[in-house]
Amino acid sequence: MSECTHDCSTCQSKCSDREEKESLLAPPNSESRVKHVIGVVSGKGGVGKSMVASMLAVAMQRRGYQAAILDADITGPSIPRSFGISDAEVSGTEAGMIPPKSKTGIEIMSVNLLIDEEAKPVVWRGPVIAGVVKQFWSDVVWNDVDYMFVDMPPGTGDVPLTVFQSLPLDGIIIVGTPQELVSMIVEKAVNMAKLMNIRIFGMIENMSYLVCPDCGERISIYGETGMNRLALSQGLPVLERLPIDTKLANMCDTGTIELMQEEYMQHAADVLEDLEKQAK
């Protein structure tokens, strides 16, 4: 037997290296049509990931695309509250569950739409939670969605791993805040994505600065940003720098995030819109 050169194009042997890897992708619902799936990720909790996912969906919806949000943060779901649909009931057909729509038509699926009390805790182990995320993909009828945003929980555990392996991601957007401690933890999520060959579109820095209400000066209350260092070291662009804005926080609390100011998320939306342009 000749020595293996690891060049399969010149070899006729049927060794294990030639075997096709079994796909771990979860099958979509037979009635669903989803063009692009974008993960919104952070290794750290409390950085505004759900708010960013909501704002991205609003930005793409305003550009004339059908947007959707799959709330994969099963134990800390907040997407329905941001859109004011916490009391919505999920309907269904033989094909699957029909996701409720926001006031502007964004399709949303979250575990908080399936429980009778909004504050009721979801006390499930990791494999069960991961299974629910896959069900939100396979058992929900997503209707002609151009951009689906998957709001993921913090960390690098079961749910991020499930999303990376089971959903047909076009890529992810990383969310963080300026503190060095946060950027160190966020870097774990960046390295996880690179380890699994997941495309990273760029980073969004939340709580980047505060605008003085009197003079309009930008005040970096957390000092020099650790996200700059992280972006530079990882070779990633910073797509947006969002201020500490009480209006945004209030919109999330009152379910009116769709009223956000137009200038937010425009650069990030440009980057994502290129996916659709390239597909044509």
Image: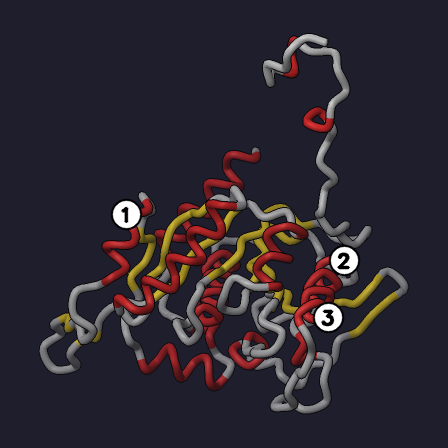
Closer to the observer: label 3 or label 2? 3
* Tally of numbered tags: 3
The amino acid type, in three-letter code, at marker 2 is: Ser
Can see residue 66? no
Mark 2: give few (<14), some (14-19) or many (20+) Cα within 10 Å.
many
N-term mark: 1 or 2: 2
Element under label 3? helix
1 or 3: tag closer to the N-terminus: 3
- Residue drawn where x is 73% and y is 28% of the image: 16
- Residue at mark 3: 128
At label 3, which amino acid type do we have? Val
**Which residue sits furthest right?**
94
Crowd band around label 3 with a 10 angstrom C-alpha radius: few (<14), some (14–19), many (20+) = few
Q: Earlier in the sequence, mark 3 or mark 2?
A: 3
Indicate whether 56 appears above or below 165. Answer: below
| Position of residue 109 measured from the top left corner of the image (x, y, whole percent) | 66, 69
In the picture, measured across the screen, residue 236 lies left or right of residue 5, that is left
Q: Residue at x 44, y 64 (%)?
A: 43
Looking at the picture, tell me which residue is in the foreground, 209 or 12. 12
- Residue visible at 15% across and 73% down? 219
Label 2 sits on a secondary structure element that is helix
Q: Quadrant of residue 107?
A: bottom right
In x, y percent, where is residue 210?
Answer: 21, 75
Amino acid type of the residue tagged 1 in the rendering: Ser
> Percent x, y for residue 7?
60, 15
Q: Position of residue 101 (x, y in %)?
A: 65, 70
Q: Which residue is mark 2?
A: 138
Element under disc 1: helix
Q: Which residue is mark 1?
A: 233
Distance Cα–Cα, label 3 vs label 2: 15 Å
